[in-house]
Image (cartoon, rainbow, N blue to C red):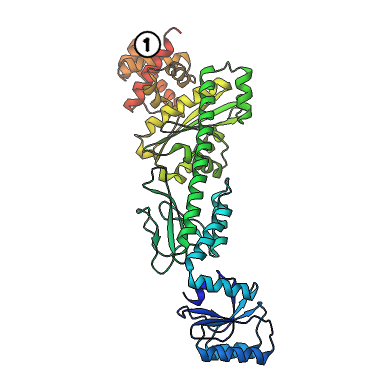
């Protein structure tokens, strides 16, 4: 064990002289120094000639260092002498005799020191309810060294950067090249690491880190239970809300208010679908944070294969507000690129029942977004998006109101013209014959329809969706 290894463990500080990390310590002396010894002075006399004489004797005997009480600065002459003799002078922050005994035990039986630190680690880390940052800080205090917390991919989450390579794919304790140790915080399956704790210290730090890793594992497990309980509560509340529609009773309204959900107003739904297996419970906070970073305050609920969310406003949002929300959601999707999300955004709908309607649209939009690589797998149900969704809705209760909403801006005459035109397989001549008008009149009406709806009737999917919508809108309710 060298001098540098003993500094933190025995509350020693360097006052002067070169600290040679290769200088080995073989014992402790409080009387006459010897080769490799830590020569400990028990009195605090700092008269220049007395301290210089002791420093000379220690250097002549080949002592590893001279330990003096206190941490007051040395006189300039003593500093120069320590440098010339190449013998470090260390300050003792505690009682010098107790420090000498502690150093002797540490050198003779280092496992005793390890046991002492493990006991100290248990005392400060087994408190329960500690955050990961608090666990890291307390482990650092016990080890007198900065502990680093690494994510499962090796990225530093807390503490200083780690230069040594940690083999994150191998969830076992590791001694790192160049010094330091890494201990995994095992995931529930026991075959992978949830996190890594890394210390720049010696191999003796492994046991302390193992205590910290166990505490972190328990803390993460408790946090997981809390998250799952909250997710079940929110999912159950949403299920009741979707079933009740506009008939939410006082009890349901009270529980929604306690959860911070506003049922009145206008709701705009969003669906985040995961295209690969993901832990939706623990990743919910990532969705919330990504939306909050864009200034979007949304209710987020985890469900199978992803999340639903909605934003509530007191008044119907205008086109500009909806566009800003869509841009923010799209940016949040980019921030969450590692989750590889399919995102659908619905139109605003009013009242408690509007939550069910807007989330239904958002879910359908997210399903279609998976085939929209050209839009970054993001689909916003504007009028064009609604035309695309009609095909997905033909077997649901959502189809009829969505179809009529799509054609709401058209006059009855234009709806009739569009129906006949599509029945005639987009033939201007045949449509004109059926309606008894000139073909140029049909052409002008078709152009007007495209402008009002914001669609291109040259697109086959759009023509089919609008044809279905026309059939619904002209049929009896």
Q: Residue at x 59, y 18 (%)?
A: 248
State whether residue 166 is above or below residue 339. Answer: below
Q: Which residue is mark 1?
A: 435
Q: Residues within 10 Å of mark 1 (few under 14, many from 20)?
A: some
Q: Residue at x 37, y 38 (%)?
A: 277
Give whichever of 269, 24 is nearer the camera: 24
- In the rendered structure, the answer to whether residue 276 lies left or right of residue 25 reads left
Q: Residue furthest top?
A: 476
State whether residue 389 is above or below residue 161. Answer: above
Residue 148: x and y in percent read 49, 59
Q: Residue at x 34, y 34 (%)?
A: 371
Give whichever of 310, 368 is nearer the camera: 310
Let me know if residue 454 appears in the view.
Answer: no
Let me know if residue 293 appears in the view.
Answer: yes
- Identify the secondary structure beneath mark 1: helix
Residue 296: x and y in percent read 56, 39
Residue 376: x and y in percent read 39, 40
Q: Residue at x 51, y 89 (%)?
A: 61
Residue 363 sits in which quadrant?
top left
State whether residue 470 is above or below residue 69. Answer: above
Residue 12: x and y in percent read 59, 74
């Amino acid at each position: 064990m060298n001098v540098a290894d003993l500094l933190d463990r025995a509350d020693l500080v360097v006052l002067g002289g070169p600290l040679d990390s290769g200088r080995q310590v073989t014992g402790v002396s409080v009387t006459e120094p010897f080769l490799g010894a830590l020569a400990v002075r028990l009195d605090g006399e700092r008269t220049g000639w007395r301290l210089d004489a002791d420093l000379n004797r220690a250097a002549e005997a080949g002592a590893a260092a001279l330990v003096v009480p206190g941490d007051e600065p040395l006189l300039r002459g003593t500093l120069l002498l320590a440098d010339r003799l190449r013998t470090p002078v260390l300050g003792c922050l505690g009682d010098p005799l107790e420090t000498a005994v502690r150093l002797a035990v540490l050198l003779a039986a280092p496992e005793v020191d390890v046991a002492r630190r493990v006991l100290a680690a248990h005392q400060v880390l087994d408190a329960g309810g500690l955050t990961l940052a608090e666990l890291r800080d307390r482990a650092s205090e016990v080890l007198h060294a900065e502990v680093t917390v690494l994510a499962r991919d090796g990225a530093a989450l807390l503490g200083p950067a780690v230069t040594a390579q940690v083999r994150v794919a191998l969830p076992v304790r590791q001694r790192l090249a160049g010094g330091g140790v890494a201990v995994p915080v095992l995931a529930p399956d026991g075959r992978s690491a949830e996190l890594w704790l890394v210390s720049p210290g010696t191999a003796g730090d492994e046991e302390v880190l193992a205590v910290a890793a166990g505490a972190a594992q328990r803390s993460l497990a408790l946090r997981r239970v809390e998250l799952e309980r909250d997710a079940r509560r929110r999912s159950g509340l949403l299920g009741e809300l979707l079933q009740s529609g506009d008939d939410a009773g006082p009890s349901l309204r009270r529980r929604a208010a306690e959860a911070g959900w506003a049922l009145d107003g206008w709701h705009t739904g969003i669906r985040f679908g995961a295209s690969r297996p993901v832990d939706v419970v623990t990743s919910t906070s990532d969705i919330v944070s990504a939306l909050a970073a864009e200034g979007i305050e949304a209710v987020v609920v985890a469900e199978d294969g992803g999340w639903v969310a909605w934003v509530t406003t007191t008044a119907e949002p205008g086109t500009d507000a909806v566009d800003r929300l869509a841009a923010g959601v799209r940016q949040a999707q980019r921030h969450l690129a590692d989750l590889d999300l399919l995102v659908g955004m619905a139109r605003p709908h009013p009242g408690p029942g509007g939550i069910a309607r807007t989330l239904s649209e958002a879910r359908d939009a997210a399903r279609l977004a998976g085939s929209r690589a050209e839009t970054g797998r993001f689909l916003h149900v504007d009028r064009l998006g609604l035309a695309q969704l009609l095909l997905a809705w033909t077997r649901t209760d959502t189809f009829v109101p969505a179809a009529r909403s799509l054609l709401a801006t058209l006059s009855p005459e234009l709806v009739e013209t569009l129906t006949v035109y599509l029945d005639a397989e987009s033939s201007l001549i045949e449509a004109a014959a059926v309606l008894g008008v000139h073909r140029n009149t049909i052409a002008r009406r078709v152009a007007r329809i495209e402008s009002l709806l914001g669609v291109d009737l040259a697109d086959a999917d759009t023509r089919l969706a609008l044809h279905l919508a026309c059939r619904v809108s002209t049929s009896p309710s």
